[in-house]
Amino acid sequence: MKTAVIGIGYWGPNLIRNFLSSGSIEKVYVYDINPSRLDFIKRRFGEVIVAENEDSIFNNKEIDIVAIATPVDRHFNLAKRALEMNKHVWVEKPYTTSAEQAEILNNLAEEKGLNIFVDHTFIYTGAVRKMKELIDSGELGDILYFDSVRINLGLFQSDVNVIWDLAPHDLSIMFYLLNKKPTAISANGIANYYGHENVAHISVYFENNCFSHFHVNWTSPVKIRRMIVGGTKKMLVFDDMENSEKIKVYDSGIEMKEKEGIYNALVQYRIGDMYSPKLVQTEALTLGVEEFITSIKEKRKPLTNGDDGLNVVRILEASHKSIKQKGKLITL
């Protein structure tokens, strides 16, 4: 296959490197509106082919895949053009700026028999795959809550707020792990700089008394990447800042026993052993590229497809509505 990467800023070079490393990719074309980035990429990856403009990519019939790593406000138009020219599409997160745009792209891909891959990279990490395995096996029991913190100092984005920038990572993980449909969300936050919220909290409600919470922040003095998943049997902590033992499983929980009525309920705390499972160390983006290419060959949807992108964008849209109304509950 032959691939084109449009947008070679921060993440684009990683895409180019992994496409070039794939045995299924014969050529990689690149384009960016910034000539200095094209010069940089040509020096770093001598085998890439620099396209004259975007039209030359879309009109090139030998290109099978278009990867889009531009600011989010360009995702829809570029992806739509690629699909109309019968090319499979790779789109960085967040997928689109609205659920309506995501639905249009998904329907177009379905009509043409093409694949859309949304780069929710964390789904392909060894840690998140292991979390999924533990949850699906029933080791944690019924999931009660999903709590996520993703905070650091910077990088401020000029086009989106902190929710649109940081939350897609953890929202995609939430959907992947819980396999539940959210019913409502509430979001609170504040914009201290440039009119975009830089600190925010999102609450996501599910049926069966399950709850998720997300804390995102561009203005934290410390960098934290941590998730806690609480189950009725065990609890799990994922700390992505750990070099080893990124996942720890705790045999901890709470049991309620009634004694002469609810007001005399006896709370018992269970604190047992902790262990850290071994994780696969393969680079997530490498596995993502392999999954996308394999899905095209097998004519099936990839693991992180347009439907997953749509689910995340719906939450982002609802969060925007809620945060502008001081945390109003938005029904999904």
Image (tube, rainbow, N blue to C red):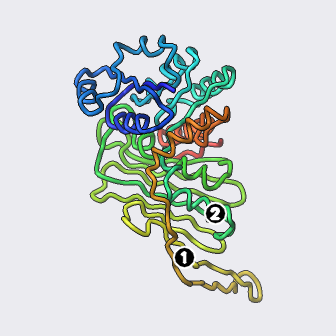
Q: Nearer the viewer, residue 241 or 50?
A: 50
Q: CA distance from mark 1 to mark 2?
A: 13 Å
Residue 41 left/right relative to 256:
left
Vertical side of 52 occupied by 224: above or below = below
Residue name at image x 59 percent, y 84 percent = 269
Q: Amino acid at mark 1?
A: Tyr
Residue name at image x 53 percent, y 57 percent = 128
Q: Nearer the viewer, residue 239 or 162?
A: 239
- Residue indicated by mark 2: 135
For numbered disc 1, what is the local secondary structure? Answer: strand
Dot 1, crowdedness within 10 Å: few (<14), some or many (≥20)? some
Disc nearer the start of the sequence (1/2): 2
Which disc is residue 172 wearing?
none
Vertical side of 18 occupied by 112: above or below = above
Residue 54 left/right relative to 313:
left
For numbered disc 2, what is the local secondary structure? Answer: helix
Give the percent coordinates (x, y) of residue 27: 43, 25
Q: Amino acid at mark 2?
A: Ile
Res 300 quadrant in image: top right
Residue name at image x 65 percent, y 36 percent = 301
Q: From this viewpoint, which residue is outermost toward the bottom?
A: 260
- Residue indicated by mark 1: 250
Give the percent coordinates (x, y) of residue 248: 49, 71
Residue 322 left/right relative to 232:
left
Dot 2, crowdedness within 10 Å: few (<14), some or many (≥20)? some
Give the percent coordinates (x, y) of residue 187: 50, 47
Vertical side of 195 occupied by 136: above or below = below
